[in-house]
Amino acid sequence: MPSIRIPTLILACGFVLGAWPAAAEDTDVQLVIREHKFVPAEITVPARKKIKLIIENQDATAEEFESDQLNREKVVPPKGKITLFVGPLEPGRYPFFGEFHKETAKGVLIAK
Amino acid sequence: MLGIAILVFREVLEAALVVSVVFAATRGVPGRERWIGAGVAAGVLGAVAIALSAGVIADAAAGMGQELFNAVVLFAAVVMIGWHAIWMATHGRQLALQLQALGSEVSVGHRPLMALLLVVALAVLREGSEVVLFLFAQVAGGSGWVDIAGGIALGVAGGCATGLALYLGLLRIPIRHFFTATNWLLLLLAAGMASQGARFLVQADLLPSLGPKLWDTSTLLSDRSLLGQTLHALIGYDARPAGIQVLFYVVTGALIIIGMRVWGKPRRRTTHGAHGAPQAR
C-alpha cells in the first residue's frame, strides 16, 4: 500500500537523522512581550551557536513571533511562554516582529 | 480594516490555493462539492477549536506542542495527497478518457475523496486557527466591529478570488493532459508540506537542520510577496530553507513519483474520443 510506504520512509528518515550528532550546547535567550512590544527590542546572541529562544507573553492577547530572516513563526498564547530554536547564525542582524501587532511589536536579534 | 484584511487574506489565500488544487484534481468526480465543502466546514470548526486551546497546545510536549501539532497535521496531509496522486496515476487516464467521451461525470468511488476531504480540512484548520487567534487579539485590543467584519469580508473574498482564479486557470489545460498536470501539482503540494513540516521539527530541535540556511533567494523573491506566498502554498517555495527541508522535499517528491510508476499503469497518451469533446464542469 502506498499509504503505508510513505510514512514508513518518513519515519525511517526521522530515525536516521535523529541519530545525527547534536550541535554544541545551546544558548538560552529570554524575551518578553509586554503591551505588544518585545522587551528587550534588541538582543545580542553569540554567532554560530544554536539559540534557544524563550518568549514570555505578559499580554492578555495572543501574539505570533515571526521572522523572515530567521525563517521562523510561532504563536505565543496570551499569558503564555514558548520556546523555539534558531541558528546557528552567521554574524548579522535578524529582525523579527509580532504578526498580530506589527505596528509596535518589532525587534532584532544581533548575532556576534 | 486594511491591516486585518491583509492578515486574513494571507491565511485564506494559502488554504484557498490548496482547496483549488484539490477541486481541480477531483474534476468529474460526482459529489465532490459536498465532500470538499464538508472538508472546509470541518476545517473552520477545527480552527476555532485549535485557537481556543492554543494555550494547552503550546504547553504540551515541553513547550513544543505547536510544532509537533503542525508537523503532524502537515505530514498527515502529505500522506493523503501522496495516496491520492498515486491512486490518480492508476485511474486518471481512464477518468480523462471518460470525461472526453461523455463530457459528464464519471463514477470513481468515494475512496480518494475521503483522503482529500482531510487534506482540505487540515489546510483550512492550520491557516484558520491563526486567523481566529488574530481576531481574538483584535477584539481584545479594542478594534471596532465594523473594522473586524470588513477586514474578514475583504480578506476572505480576496483569498477565495485568488483560489478561484487558479482553478479557472487549471481548467484551461486540455483534458488529455489535465490529470497529469493536477497530479504533478499534488506532488509538489505534498513535497512543499513535507518541507514545512520538517521546518517545524527543526524549530522544535527535534530534527537537525543540516545547515540552517542552505540558500537565500529572498532578494529575488521574498516569502512575503504575493507571488512568494502563492508559490509557498502551492509548491513549498521557501526563500531560506534549511538543508533538511530540501531533503524532505526531494524524498517526498521521489517517493510519490516511485509510487506512481510502480502502481500506476503505463501512462501512454491514447487519444480515443474526440479532442473537442464537451468540457466537464
Image (cartoon, coloured by chain):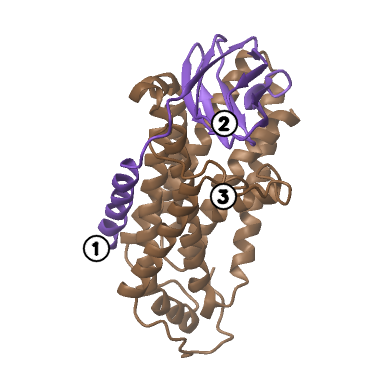
Q: Identify the chain of the residue marked 2, using the numbered disc in the image.
A: B
Q: Residue at x 53, y 41 (%)?
A: B212
Looking at the image, residue A25 lies above or below residue B252: above
The reply to whether dot 1 and dot 3 touch (C-beta < 8 Å) is no
| Residue behind mark 2 | B131
> Closer to the camera, A48 or B237?
A48
In the rendered view, would you say B222 is above or below B108?
above
Q: CA distance from mark 2 to mark 3?
A: 16 Å
Q: Which residue is mark 1?
A: A1
From the rendered image, report the letter of the chain displayed in purple. Answer: A
Residue at point 59%, 19% (across, down): B137
Chain of the residue under label 1:
A
Q: Residues within 10 Å of mark 2 (few under 14, many from 20)?
A: many
Inspect the image, locate mark 3, and give the three-letter code of the amino acid beneath it: Ala
Rendered shade, chain B: brown
* Residue B30 placement (x, y as % from top left): 41, 64
Of marks 2 and 3, which one's residue comes earlier in the chain? 2
Circle 2: residue type: Val
Q: Quadrant of the N terminus of chain B?
A: top right
